[in-house]
Image (spheres, rainbow, N blue to C red):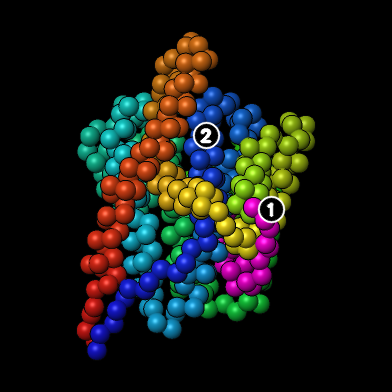
Amino acid sequence: MTNNTYLASKPRYEILDGLRGVAAMIVVAFHLFETYSPGPMFQILNHGYLAVDFFFVLSGFVIGYAYDDRWNRMTTWTFFKRRLVRLHPLLIMGTLIGGVLFYFGDAPMFQLVMQTPWWMLLLAIVMGCLMIPTPPSMDIRGWSEINSLNGATWSLMWEYIANILYALVIRRFSKVVLVVFVALSALLTIDLSLNLDVFGLLAVRDYAKYTVIGGFGLSPDQLYIGITRLLYPFFMGLLLSRIGRYIQVKGGFWWCSLFITVILVIPHVGGEAHCYLDGIYNAVSILVFFPLIVLMGAGSRVTDQRSMKVCKFLGDISYPLYITHYPWIYVHMKWAADHQEAPLSVHICVAVGLFLLTIAIAYATLKLYDEPVREWLKQHVLMKKSKH
């Protein structure tokens, strides 16, 4: 008896793909502006960090749509293989780019870079490629990131955890149980956003009070922030896919793009005197606005060729752009620190050039590496037949 572990892909939600690309571009711009920001309150594209929470809602929705009705003909191992084939090649590429650029990013805030011997760099590359989180004792940059070579990897680690939770446990939840689970997860979001600190883990994050910034390390506060940022958005997305009631609007992609852009770039709310208002904004964006945008994107349709091409391009480069851009941000921080006296016009030119470079690299990585590698893996791993 044979078991074909390959399952053909379902039709895609073009608008949701496009929105992922819009958010990814905002993330790159957010990180470039962050180089010049003295703190979260003064960041120019102030709420760009919320793009990660939006990504999680999208991911949960797509996972539910793609896999919920396939478990009668798909094993857990098959699911894991499909997710690894989709996600892991680009994770490896992002880590390798970070390794190549590592010594070019010895900005003043990265005191450990030039103290790092070559063998520790190689070890970090191997650990990053295997998605082994870096403990603080093995940090080679100085920010205690999960992957010292590519800071963006932290959210992918939580994405993997979400997939594991879904496959092993949460896919079996009824709608009622899932609603209860999502509601309880919402309480964690409120605790984090409003700095209620019910569990006494947030006292160390004065730099980011009343935001959801964090989740990129292995300390107790960072782990709590990471799991909080994951649970509600991802499994709310899953719940939305199961409910199957969407919102249809004309020109849905353009309206949704406008809404997500405004949410991510709006200035800090409340100022120093009323920071809690920004916490409310964080909570409402995650709990209400992002699910509504996903419902609009899923319920609307792209009818003209121009919008279809835009959505496809943005969807295609969204993940490559997100997972390969951050090593260049380290280099940008180094350049900006070394050229503080350069005219503003020069800083703008460098930032715009890097923005365009990251998009070009993302597209080249997609076409020359990711698509060929995934096609090879599909043929030799997903479509492999085994005897029972």
The quarter holding residue 203 reads: top right
- Image check: 126 left or right of 167? left
Mark 1 secondary-structure assignment: helix
The kind of residue on which mark 1 rests is: Phe
Q: Position of residue 190 (x, y in %)?
A: 69, 53
Q: Position of residue 72 (x, y in %)?
A: 43, 83
Q: Which residue is mark 1?
A: 289
Q: Residues within 10 Å of mark 2 (few under 14, many from 20)?
A: some
Query: Quick one: 385 or 245, which is closer to the camera?
Result: 245
Position of 83 relative to 51 (above/below): below
Q: Residue at x 58, y 26 (%)?
A: 38
- Tell me if residue 213 can be seen: no
Q: Which residue is mark 2?
A: 29
Q: Residues within 10 Å of mark 1 (few under 14, many from 20)?
A: some
The kind of residue on which mark 2 rests is: Ala
Query: Quick one: 50 or 293, which is closer to the camera?
Result: 293
Provide the residue span drawn in magenta: 229-251
Q: Residue at x 45, y 32 (%)?
A: 355
Q: Position of residue 26 (x, y in %)?
A: 54, 39
Q: Quadrant of the N terminus?
A: bottom left
- Image check: 175 left or right of 70? right
